Image (tube, rainbow, N blue to C red):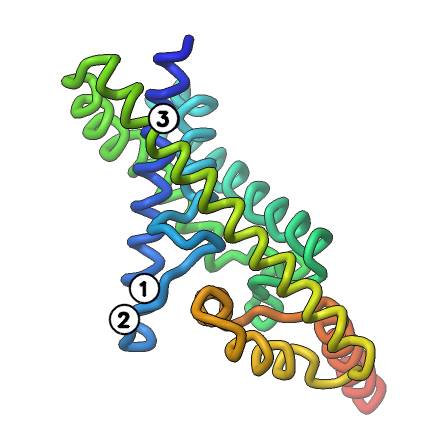
Amino acid sequence: MFNRICFLFLLFMIYSFLGWLMEVILQFLEKKRFINRGFLIGPYCPIYGWGSITIILLLYKYKEDFVTLFCMAIVICSLLEYGTSFVMEKLFHTRWWDYSDKKFNINGRICLDTMLPFGILGCIVLYVINPFFTNILNNFSSLGLNIVAIILFVLYLVDNIISFNVIFKIRKTICNVEKDATEEITRKVKNILTKQGILYRRMVNAFPTIKNTKEYLINLRKKIDNDLKKFKDR
């Protein structure tokens, strides 16, 4: 049982790293500079790790049915992204990403532009990536894999503690700003955080669309009012 957990954790770290690498490359192509994506300091995005492991454990039986696999991968990854956005917003009063300006979005948390790639990535994971890395890991001894998994878990745990401490301080900053601001909250928060140290600047750069919930609701209300006005003027 312990060997199985360690094996899955190593796969989790591999997929988290690959997800981070993909995000970094996409950001580099768009902004022509390196941005350490994700909530954590290290080179990994856990949401990709959780998504991949969930797909491997739940959808392996659909491997022979491409259409079902594709659709189920979309559902699982979209639920994971929506749930992560919802929980993080409730915990930190902050929107870490926002798809409200994209068509076919659900509460700005997920959108069609990201859902379809989830299905493609899910199929690539099961058909190509997972067999490749599983074969590599199987060539190592259980003891060696367990030692590596334990070391990585300790580093991952420390990273989570440090990163969540930074995020909770970001939440405190947001709450302090909210006391005397109803407009441009996000801009003021970013200005304050970028002066507090490299870890805070990294978080701001990693999530350039980070948006305080209060400002998000203000902007959403304005958008609804404008849409209603346009409708009445027809």
Q: Amino acid at mark 1?
A: Leu
In front: 79, or 91?
A: 91
Task: Report the residue at 69% width, 85% height from top.
Answer: 184
Task: Report the residue at 63% width, 70% height from top.
Answer: 211
Image vertical order of residue 106 relative to residue 98, above or below: above
Q: Is residue 132 left or right of residue 178?
A: left
Q: Amino acid at mark 2?
A: Leu
User: In terms of secondary structure, where does tag 1 sit?
Assistant: helix
Residue 150: give its label.
Answer: 3
Q: Tell me the quarter of the picture where residue 206 sits.
A: bottom left
Does the residue at mark 1 contact the one at mark 2 (Cβ under 8 Å)? yes
Q: Residue 230: x, y in percent?
A: 77, 87
Q: Nearer the viewer, mark 3 or mark 2?
A: 3
Q: In this orientation, does residue 176 appear? A: yes
Q: Tell me the quarter of the picture where residue 55 sits.
A: top left
In front: 46, or 198?
A: 198
Spot the residue most to the top.
Answer: 1
Task: Report the residue at 32% width, 61% height from top.
Answer: 24
> Which residue in the structure is indicated by mark 1?
26
> Which residue in the structure is indicated by mark 2?
29
Does the residue at mark 1 contact the one at mark 3 (Cβ under 8 Å)? no
What's the CA distance linking mark 1 and mark 3? Answer: 31 Å
Image quadrant for the C terminus?
bottom right
Q: Nearer the viewer, mark 1 or mark 3?
A: 3
What's the CA distance linking mark 3 and mark 2? Answer: 35 Å
